[in-house]
Amino acid sequence: MIRRTFFNLIGGVSLLLGILGIFLPLLPTTPFVLLASACFMRGSPRFHHWLNQHPTLGPMLHNWHQNRAVTKRVKRNGLITILLSFSFSIYVAPVFWVKCMLIVLLVVLITWFIRLPTHE
């Protein structure tokens, strides 16, 4: 019982952070959604089923579990979102060293993201 509650708590927090990551530039969405799926698989079959049947997140999760890859559409949309959110963050950052740090993080994130395998 305690184990299921623990996995449900971690899964819920991970899903919340994943949803926040859609809107916040430095918070990744995909790893948190994958963690939520894994936790719900162990803690709540009902939430795991709901997450995997979700119209937006379900196909991404299925593709990742089956192929360890993302679709070209997900990669394109991700790149656009990353570039827009980081550009906005760099523009509004008041301190020069913060702008430099954001640029370095952008380069690292883009490099990692482009290297993700694609699958249709």
Image (cartoon, rainbow, N blue to C red):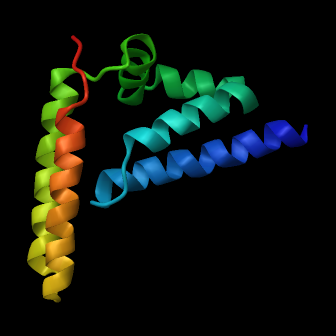
The quadrant of the rendering that contains the C terminus is top left
User: Looking at the picture, how far across and down is residue 72, in whole percent?
Assistant: 16, 23
> Horizontal placement of 103 versus 43: left or right?
left
Marks counted in the figure total: 0
Q: Is residue 116 above or below residue 12?
A: above
Q: Is residue 112 above or below residue 117?
A: below
Q: Is residue 59 above or below residue 88?
A: above
Confirm whether residue 44 shows in the render: no
Q: Is residue 24 above or below residue 96?
A: above
Q: Residue furthest bottom?
A: 95
Question: Residue at horizontal 18%, vertical 57%?
Answer: 106
The quadrant in which residue 107 appears is bottom left
> Horizontal placement of 41 versus 114: left or right?
right
Question: Residue at horizontal 84%, vertical 39%?
Answer: 3
Q: Say which of 38 and 51 sits in front.
A: 38
Q: Say which of 47 and 112 sits in front.
A: 112
Q: Say which of 103 and 83 sits in front.
A: 103
User: Looking at the picture, how far across and down is residue 108, in whole percent?
Assistant: 21, 52
Q: Residue furthest right?
A: 1
Confirm whether residue 19 shows in the render: yes
Q: Say which of 78 and 58 sits in front.
A: 78
Question: Residue at horizontal 48%, vertical 53%?
Answer: 17
The quadrant in which residue 29 appears is top left
The quadrant in which residue 8 appears is top right
> Horizontal placement of 81 versus 67: left or right?
left
Question: Residue at horizontal 17%, vertical 46%?
Answer: 110
The quadrant of the rendering that contains the N terminus is top right
User: Looking at the picture, how far across and down is residue 18, in whole percent?
Assistant: 44, 47
User: Looking at the picture, how far across and down is residue 100, in whole percent?
Assistant: 14, 74
> Horizontal placement of 96 versus 55: left or right?
left
